[in-house]
Amino acid sequence: MKREYLKKATLTAKSDASEVHETVKTILADIEAGGDAKAKEYAAKFDRYEGNVMLTAEEIEAAAALVPEKLKADIQFAHDNVKRFAEAQKGTVSDVEVEIVPGMVAGQKAIPVDAAGCYVPGGRYSHIASAIMTVTTAKVAGCGHITACSPPRPGVGVAPAIIYAAHLCGADKIMALGGVQGVAAMTFGLFGLPKANILVGPGNQFVAEAKRILFGRVGIDMIAGPTDSLVLADKTADAHIVATDLVSQAEHGYNSPVWLVTDDRDLAEKVMDLVPGLIDDLPDVNRENAFAAWRDYAEVILCSDREEMAACSDDYAPEHLTVQADDLDWWLERLTCYGSLFLGEETTVSYGDKATGTNHVLPTSGAANYTGGLSVHKYMKIVTWQRATRDGAKQVAEATARISRLEGMEGHARAADVRLAKYFPDEEFDLTANG
């Protein structure tokens, strides 16, 4: 059976890339040339904020005092889970030392980058969880300096809960600076910061484009587009829960795709009937986003069987992938392209977004075809080293000389030749390419 689209998207999650690119390019150049003063100028223009950029210890303490104790406990709970999972991830990478041939030892070291810049969205929604996800993983990785940067609100500043979360999770500095100017400040080392080695965290299309332009002079976690989510559901799924999960992700933004892939027509039709009412029941700002996302970007796809469903999901390579179907072990083994996988009705993307411990900074727009999400590994450089005795390097030197000459790289060959001549002056070696 060919895939049948019971609902087809009329738009794709793409912005006017050329216009955004030119805007961001100009802002970055202005700030690099103008430094702190120019960054503050853009903060006043875009954030409508002229307060202190680098938060003081007193300001952090004052913000923490505004956070309700129950919310503090929830933030601590989420932080503990993220930290625990990050520590387990770090344990999967270890230093390695192996004797390649007798006398020739090669090794691997995992070295954290020194300075990490963590962008925490704070515009329409205060993304407390993004502070937890980015700062905690950088801290566990062992980064020497961590900056958390979040857009301030006019006359208010950064949301107190974001400040509290960033501080709790280990940020060394917290900046009230949003958008391109925030990314630029961390990259260029403004306001007394060390220049960031890596930029991480979600953001709007301008933040994403700034990271794209700066990639190369600074590392990044990924270039993220609008968040997306796919649900795989069979006849055993609860239509109301499926519909609720789709709506919960559509509220991210007007251009956030949500997709339902199923082999059960009745379920698909029930879900499509339920979604509009669930959207209508949301608060105003959430309803506006979810309505547009469902109308313009959502798709409902009917497949013949679970194998076709899995193939369809892998084609989409969603950021978030939920399975509400029978035989969860089969799906775990079969699926290959996703940012984070949620198996069974008992879990949901919202859990992963906020408090489970797995990271919510994930590949979007099909990037899950080739990369995973943010983890301690993103902050770490896996480097190699080698050491040899003279006898241990003898065979390697001979092979190197001959391979180099076959490639036409005489200088490389001579680096091996001189060592053989020095260490084994009484021996003859055939080091020609055709030897």
Image (tube, rainbow, N blue to C red):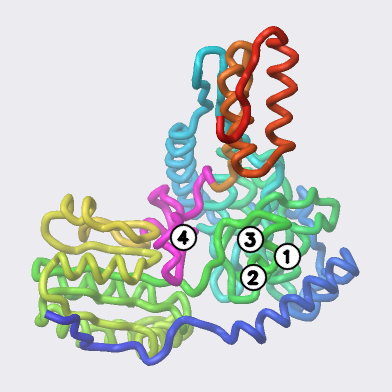
Determine the CA span between mark 3 and mark 4: 14 Å
CB atoms of marks 1 and 2 within 8 Å: yes
Q: Which mark is residue 362?
A: 4
| x, y percent for residue 316 | 34, 71
The amino acid type of the residue labelled 2 equals Val
Q: Which mark is residue 119?
A: 3
CB atoms of marks 1 and 3 within 8 Å: yes
Determine the CA span between mark 1 and mark 3: 8 Å
Residue that carries the numbered disc 1 in the rendered image? 182
Determine the CA span between mark 1 and mark 2: 9 Å
The amino acid type of the residue labelled 4 equals Leu
Question: Is 117 located above or below residue 300 in the figure?
Answer: above
Residue at x 29%, y 88% (from the top left corner): 8
Assess whether residue 392 is covered by the magenta stretch.
no
Question: Is 121 located above or below residue 124 in the figure?
Answer: above
* Secondary structure type for disc 1: helix
The amino acid type of the residue labelled 1 equals Gly
Assess whether residue 365 is covered by the magenta stretch.
yes
CB atoms of marks 4 and 1 within 8 Å: no
| x, y percent for residue 262 | 17, 74
Pair 3/4: label in front: 4
Residue 108 in view in this figure: yes
Dividing the image into 4 quarters, which one contains the C terminus?
top right
Residue that carries the numbered disc 2 in the rendered image? 207
Question: Is 396 located above or below residue 296 in the figure?
Answer: above
N-terminal label among 4 and 2: 2
N-terminal label among 1 and 3: 3
Residue at x 48%, y 83% (from the top left corner): 285
The residue segment tinted magenta is: 351-377
Residue at x 50%, y 53% (from the top left corner): 374
CB atoms of marks 2 and 3 within 8 Å: yes
